[in-house]
Amino acid sequence: MGKQTIQSIRGMEDVLPDEAVYFQFLEAAARRVFGRAQYREIRTPLLEPTELFARSAGDSSDIVVSKQMYTFVDPGERSNTLRPEGTAGVIRALIEHGVFKESAQQKLYYTGPMFRYEKPQKGRLRQFNQIGIEVFGVAHAAADAEIIVLCVEFLREVGFRDVCVKLNNLGDREDRQAYNNRLREVLAGGASDGWCPQCVERARLNPMRVFDCKEQRCRALVAGLPAVGDFIGEPARAHFATLRSLLEACEVPYEIAPDLVRGLDYYSRTVFEIVQGGLGAQNAVVGGGRYDYLVEELGGPPTPGVGMSIGVERLILAMKALDLRPPGEPPPAAMVLALDDAAMPSAFRLASAARVSGAPVALDLQPRSPKAGLKAANRLGVRVAVIIGADEAARGVAQWKDLSEGTQTEVRVEEALERLKALSDPSVTCR
RNA sequence: GUGGGUAUAGUUCAGUUGGUUAGAACGCCAGAUUGUGGCUCUGGAGGUCGUCGGUUCAAAUCCGACUAUCCACCCCA
């Protein structure tokens, strides 16, 4: 590696072909699972006005979050930000196009790269991909349940077993505010009560975060704090009960996780997460929840919403940890080899004609010795090699070699073309 | 943002207490019947040892800085 080579930006990974099949596999599965539940794809820009994310993040996490955004001023002197998540852009698009006026109910999914300026580590990149789904306009807990059920279906579809959802109820906005205020009071003692410096800071910014402090003495102190449950009003309580009964109705395994707290304060009522072992510290593969106030916050009509997003790279790590592999593309049935320049036109024409009729056919793009060519054919895993040299080209024939049986016969090129077409599996080409 | 580990061939890694031309496996290319693959054997290409600087007669090896990467913390929309 010379010193003048250019390398990718920190935290931004290339996805080489061997890796890309994982992405293709997961995206295809998402389209299947979400598509059959009547969710439709939405694609929004990677770049949005900074204002959008500043508003969606809310004020308490504003300072923290803005440091982790890729924000820049464009030549027109507007502040733009690479999207750090998918939901805000989706909501902006729906408001902008008046979609909520046609119908408040929307079921959508999206996939694509997100950007966060964080220090990279395992399962945490600066550019990473998410697959997400959102339901708008449904206050009923069936929406929460469907989102969660679809997550579980998706994970099972791609090969995961033993999926368990961690679930919590944060209550409505007023409940949460009351609880946060109470927590701040209780935590006011700060360091003198024995809290670690980080928890003292959390008490100020996002008190509920003290619940996942890892300090021994904080964990002990946390046990004595008032429980969020005591502050949750009857409507949110009933909502959560309905959700649980729906999950139980379709036997979705879940556990209540009282310490599951989301960082941003637009969540209300339901929050959930699915974690996977073997991923190190960044083990949350799926996260989501209800955000009944966010659409209004972004200037739209009051519209409830629920959503979740899947961290694609993390999911791929989890697949590898469990030795789950995407089904590979089947190798082409045949490879056409030209032994010299004189044979290339004939070989080239034969391969093209076969491909046009739907047969997956490999072509060695430079003349090579039969030995090298067959080696390449073997490596690709094809069953048949069609060999054409100057002699064959002149006579309008080709050598049809079956690599598994080792037999070889001379056929006319027209016959070779028919055989190549026949080799292609009709179940693959016709749907 | 904080703390720690690592950086040698395309890949995964060896490399003794600093000491000649830096190795292996896999992969790649070629030869072993001048137009025939897989297995085997033989050979070849490919590294200014992450970058820059320092210590030393001598640095892949010791020291420093920088960069990247990994692990954990912080945070996690």
Image (spheres, rainbow, N blue to C red):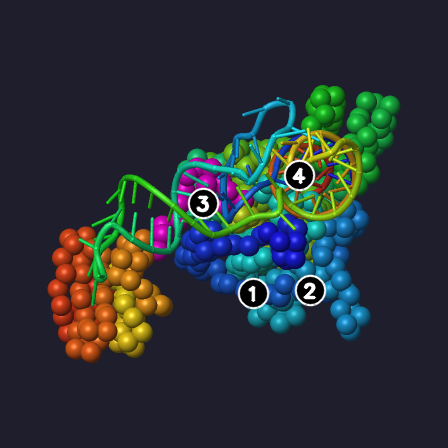
| Mark nearer the N terminus (4 vs 3) | 3
Q: Position of residue A397 (x, y in %)?
A: 17, 74
The disc at residue A43 is 1
- Amino acid type of the residue tagged 4 in the rendering: Val
| Mark nearer the N terminus (2 vs 3) | 2
Residue at point 19%, 73% (across, down): A392
Q: Which residue is mark 4?
A: A261
For the residue labelled by badge 2, is the local secondary structure a helix, a strand or a loop? strand
For the residue labelled by badge 3, is the local secondary structure a helix, a strand or a loop? helix
Q: Nearer the viewer, mark 4 or mark 2?
A: 2
Q: Nearer the viewer, mark 1 or mark 4?
A: 1
Q: Are marks 2 and 3 on the same chain?
A: yes
Q: Position of residue A90 (x, y in %)?
A: 61, 62
Asked if labels 1 and 2 touch by Cβ distance under 8 angstroms, the answer is no
Q: Tell me the crowding category of disc 1: few under 14, some 14 to 19, or many 20 or more residues within 10 angstroms, Cα based.
A: some
Give the residues in magenta: A314-331
Residue at point 55%, 62% (across, down): A105
Query: Left of B34 or right of it: where is A218?
Result: right
Asked if labels 4 and 1 touch by Cβ distance under 8 angstroms, the answer is no
Q: Tell me the crowding category of disc 2: few under 14, some 14 to 19, or many 20 or more residues within 10 angstroms, Cα based.
A: some
The disc at residue A155 is 3
The answer for which chain carries disc 3 is A
Q: Nearer the viewer, residue A350 or A372?
A: A372
